Amino acid sequence: MAWDYQREEQAFEKIPEGTYRVRIDDAEMTQSKAGNDMIKLTIAVSGQSRTIWDYIVFMPDNPSITNAKLTAIYDSFGIPEGNMKLSDWAGKVGAAKVKRDGDYEKIHFYLSRDKAASLPAWVEGRTQAPGKSLLDTLDDVVPF
């Protein structure tokens, strides 16, 4: 088979820094490079087409860090404290501060439910066209 290959650069749209509703799309138990148990979270961001990965590393030598991260997740997503059944975590919506780290986004911290109360409700996928404000996008799709 002949193919006329031409290099295509992939342009990923960046998630602007800010506070968002976020959803746990997947949570899986795995191991860190150092060999510690950890939970790998696949996080969807409201109104965005990209996902963010976040990690909860179980550090036996410093359990307060691990427990603080678990507490933040339980408080943000409404997961009962101590629930480690990761299949229960999938689909839960919480909120987080997203920051840029070089070319990538990361979860800076999770917001408790009371601190996230003023955020807009979860929105699936992209809510606005690139280079347009949300109001401009709504003008394009709302017929009245």
Image (cartoon, rainbow, N blue to C red):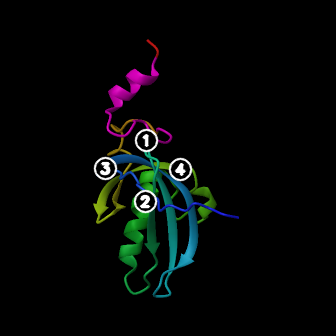
Nearer the observer, 84 or 40: 40
Image point 32% across, 63% down: which residue?
A: 103
Q: CA distance from mark 1 to mark 4?
A: 16 Å
Mark nearer the N terminus (1 vs 3): 3
Q: Which residue is mark 4?
A: 92
Residue 13, placed above or below residue 82 = above
Mark nearer the N terminus (2 vs 3): 2
Q: Which residue is mark 3?
A: 16
Where the C terminus falls, by quadrant?
A: top left
Q: Which residues are magenta?
A: 123-142
Given contact means CB atoms under 8 Å apart, are the residues at marks 1 and 4 in contact?
no
Mark nearer the N terminus (1 vs 4): 1
Mark nearer the N terminus (2 vs 1): 2
Mark nearer the N terminus (4 vs 2): 2
Q: Is residue 28 left or right of residue 33?
A: right
Q: Which residue is mark 1?
A: 47
Q: Residues within 10 Å of mark 1 (few under 14, many from 20)?
A: some
